[in-house]
Amino acid sequence: MKRAPGLVGVVVTDVDGPVVVVDEVGPGLTVVGIVEVEVDVVSTARTDATSTSKQSANAGTATRTNDEHIRGVGTWSLCHVCHHYTVALRRFVTYLALATIAVSQPLLDLYGTNLTVFSAAKVGRLEIGVFIILVMLVPAFLATAVERFSVRFGPVVHRAVEMTMVFLFLFVFGMVLLRWLKVERDYLVYPASLVFAFLLARFYAARASLRQWVDWLSIVAVAVLATFVLQAQPIFFPGSTTFAEASVGLTDVPVFMVVMDEAPLYALLGTDGRINADRFPNFAELAQQATWYRDNTAISNFTHQAVPGIMASKIPERDDSPFLALHPRNIFTLLGDKIDVDATEPVTSLCPSDVCSNTEQATGFSGSRLWTFLKDALVVYGQRTLPYYSRRGLPDTEHGWGGFGAVESRFVEQLKTGALGQANAIVDGARDLVEATKDGFGALRLVHALVPHAPWYMTPDQRITSIPVYSTTSNPESGDGTRDNYQRFMHQFIGTDRAIGQAIKVLKDGGIWDKALVIITADHGISFVPGKQQRNVVLKDRDRVLDIYKVPTFVKYPNQQMGETSDCASSNLDLLPTVVDVLNVSTTWEFLGASLATGCPQRDKRPIETATGKRGNVAETFADLQRRVTYYNDVVSADGGVNTVAAVGASAKLIGQRLDVPVATDNVLKWTVSRPEDFINLTAEPGSRVAVTINGGIVSGAFEPGTEGILLIDGVAAGVVGELSGAEGIYGYTAVIDSTLMTPGDHVVELVIRAPDGTLTSAGPPAS
């Protein structure tokens, strides 16, 4: 270590590292003491002989002991603690800036534009506040703590840790940036992010100007926070409830309103255009006792717009969230202070907490609720950051309410614990209405039930098939995979029919059916076209518009004696005005829809909206819907009972037949089922486990295109495996079987191979 004569001061090998205090003895350097202090710049001073002599004396004193040396450096010692925290703060500011662009901004931007997730997850303002603090500050705090701790291990380790932290934040930011640019390939994203982070980290280390610019970038954190708070105003500043100045003329009419979720009309229909009574007996019976508005149209293709549209009779704006502050004039604020009103709102938050007891509105602070939400946020961040193949194993965040799986997660948890919460909500709402009207006064119970919405676990008899399928909002590219989805959906829709029947029975047994106003509809439908989105739709694709916007709608008016089928050009916008008309409500409020009780609205088109803000109209009628029934009939038969849902493909006619196949195949080396325990000790109890959706693996030689597998239950053909067509090697399969064959007790499952020419060979039972 050398320097020019006449210089005295300090030499540092690393910013914030150990300071080496030196003095000149001849032409070289003499180390006179080492002390840990925090500095940001290296400074030296040229001195004259006098000052050099004084500093030499001071340095000489410092050689006695380290303690004496620390006293000798004067100001450095006095400011050591203060400077330590100053440097720590500067490091925190740096990491805050990097964490904002890599973590906070992508996550809060996504949540801020999808506030529905907070309503669906039922988290309160306190939990959201903690969530914001954790997202904004924790990454920077952790990075600062690790970096400051590394100072203890010397300048080399400290500098390496510091640059590692910078590199990691830049690497994640690179992935976020590439995801925003729609670069999805893993083999491109990871190398590009590594190069991006390496180059910027090197530039950061070499240029003080860049380090200063990064520190100034921390201001972005304030902007991100302010933007989120502004977006979340309906949550943080909900305002006070303002009830309508109105009067109710008929206060003794019970009102029961059910809004199903993701329930298309075409799925209920047979090829004759009538409700398939063999498959949906309760909807068919309802059509015989109520008015079936078979040309009714939904408002939006997503719940967070469609349900407020029903409850407020309005077309929501694109960025509207399902909160009371954004929809203050709704059915609850119209009637909530005049009659007994209650609701079940698993996704929306439109009913004031002082009106509804079943809205699940979050109050206070719940650690478990926050923890569940944070776990969901990690999945959301992974979906927002990781490339395609890396994120495939994560639960989908697009299939849900407001873009996330919050409600889906709660529904899955209900099913795992054996409770059919969503289907039971319909029946419980009917029971609650009967109880509320015992004294002869009217009441309103509104139930938004998340059935037959995915995940499709429920069987037609309301047992639970255990295969955990996390569906996405896109249908598989293969026709076989899309058909599997449609079969599972149909099973859950049939289970929903059973819940509707149970609710009607409760109303009849409670003696209020005749005088009640009963409205049953759906917020929107769903489409099952291979390779296409299930609900996101381009309005020029009129076939899928029919799938998504044509929904089953029934209105049973008070004292209605006979059923009626109406081709009225109705809309879900008309349901609230119909309630107002039937209850003889006098109000100055105006609604976009019109009452159906006094006749058909005179219109040719119904307004609709997509979640992306596109607006259009539906002029198509029930007759146009028949072509969609024909389309889906080629996927799963629209006729027949529950058992025909499993009768698909070239082997459809064999389903339900007993097959004796003595010839074994030598082309299947091994096949398995994922849950063999679901074939034994079965019960008929609702909520119990049963194998109806079956999956597993197959190891085989090459099969010809058109080859199918047939699953036998106790020797009877029960379902079709489509994955064998043209398959070879090791692959998975999914099959939906006839649930009526899964009676209480134990069952034996076998696999039969059907060649394209119809020849049958047996692969026997699955490997244990």
Image (cartoon, rainbow, N blue to C red):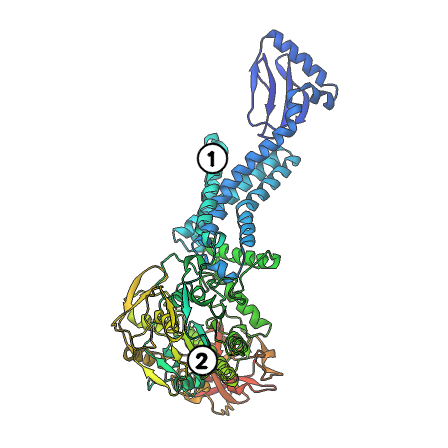
The disc labelled 2 sits on which kind of residue?
Ala
Say above or below: 6 vs 640.
above
Nearest to N terminus: mark 2 or mark 1: 1
Residue 422 position within the rendered picture, expressed as x and y whole percent measured from the top left: 51, 73
The disc labelled 1 sits on which kind of residue?
Trp
Q: Residue at x 41, y 55 (%)?
A: 184
Quadrant housing residue 755: bottom left
Q: Residue at x 59, y 19 (%)?
A: 2
Of the 4 image quadrants, the one containing the C terminus is: bottom right
Quadrant housing residue 372: bottom right
Q: Residue at x 43, y 78 (%)?
A: 518
Say above or below: 37 vs 446.
above
Q: CA distance from mark 2 to mark 1?
A: 65 Å
Asked whether disc 2 touches disc 1, contact meaning CB atoms under 8 Å apart, the reply is no
Residue 574 position within the rendered picture, expressed as x and y whole percent measured from the top left: 35, 71
Residue 729 position within the rendered picture, expressed as x and y whole percent measured from the top left: 48, 72
Does residue 702 show up?
A: no
Say above or below: 416 vs 712.
above
Residue 363: assigned label: none
In the image, taking residue 56 as reference, residue 508 lies left or right, namely left
In the image, taking residue 11 as reference, residue 226 lies left or right, namely left
From the image, tell me which residue sits under label 1. Answer: 216
Q: Among all residues in the image, which is located at the extreme right?
A: 64
Report the label total.
2
Q: Nearer the viewer, residue 766 or 287?
A: 287
From the image, tell me which residue sits under label 2. Answer: 516
Q: Nearer the viewer, residue 251 or 103?
A: 251
In the image, taking residue 674 as reference, residue 515 lies left or right, namely left
Q: Nearer the viewer, residue 133 or 512?
A: 512
Q: Residues within 10 Å of mark 2 (few under 14, many from 20)?
A: many
